[in-house]
Image (cartoon, rainbow, N blue to C red):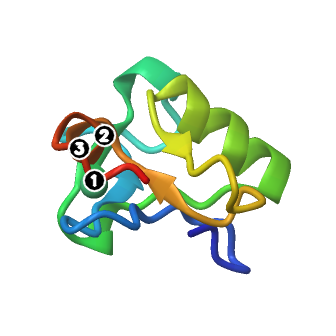
Amino acid sequence: MITPIYRVQCDGPGKEWLSLPEGHVTGADVTADNLIAAPTAKRACNWPGEKEAKRAAVGAGWRHAPDSDFKTWFCPACQSAGTRP
Ligand SMILES: [Zn+2]
């Protein structure tokens, strides 16, 4: 789901958070392809708006459930595990 503070969490069994990569330096550029799915919210990204959060999630390979109105999201690992509805 995408929460009101614009973080993205996987709705699959892993409940991963779309997060900054290990070793990320504050202020360094973050691009969609270096975001990771982390097991905790410790390094979860905060986006300024829902639009930005969605764009980052899609860029990182996350996909929303087609009938979820962009509320339900799955990280790449959960998609390949076949948990996508
Ligand atoms: Zn997942």
Q: Position of residue 15 (x, y in %)?
A: 28, 69
Q: Position of residue 19 (x, y in %)?
A: 37, 51
Residue placed under numbered mark 2 in the picture: 79
Q: Are marks 1 and 2 in contact (CB under 8 Å)?
A: yes
Residue 61 drawn above or below residue 65? above
Mark 2 secondary-structure assignment: helix
Mark 3 residue CB less than 8 A from any atom of ligand 1: no
Q: Nearer the viewer, residue 55 or 26?
A: 55
Q: Nearer the viewer, mark 2 or mark 3?
A: 3
The amino acid sitting under disc 3 is Gly
Mark 3 secondary-structure assignment: loop
The label on residue 60 is none
Residue at (19%, 41%) from the top-left corner?
Answer: 22
Report crowding for label 2: few under 14, some 14 to 19, many 20 or more residues within 10 A (C-alpha).
some
Residue at (32%, 72%) from the top-left corner?
Answer: 41
Report crowding for label 1: few under 14, some 14 to 19, many 20 or more residues within 10 A (C-alpha).
few
Q: Position of residue 21 (x, y in %)?
A: 28, 38
Q: CA distance from mark 1 to mark 2?
A: 6 Å
Side of 26 where 43 appears, left or right: left
Mark 1 residue CB less than 8 A from any atom of ligand 1: yes
Quadrant for ligand 1? Answer: bottom left
Q: Are marks 3 and 1 in contact (CB under 8 Å)?
A: yes
Residue placed under numbered mark 1 in the picture: 83
The amino acid sitting under disc 1 is Thr
The amino acid sitting under disc 2 is Gln
Q: CA distance from mark 3 to mark 1?
A: 4 Å
Mark 1 secondary-structure assignment: loop
Residue placed under numbered mark 3 in the picture: 82
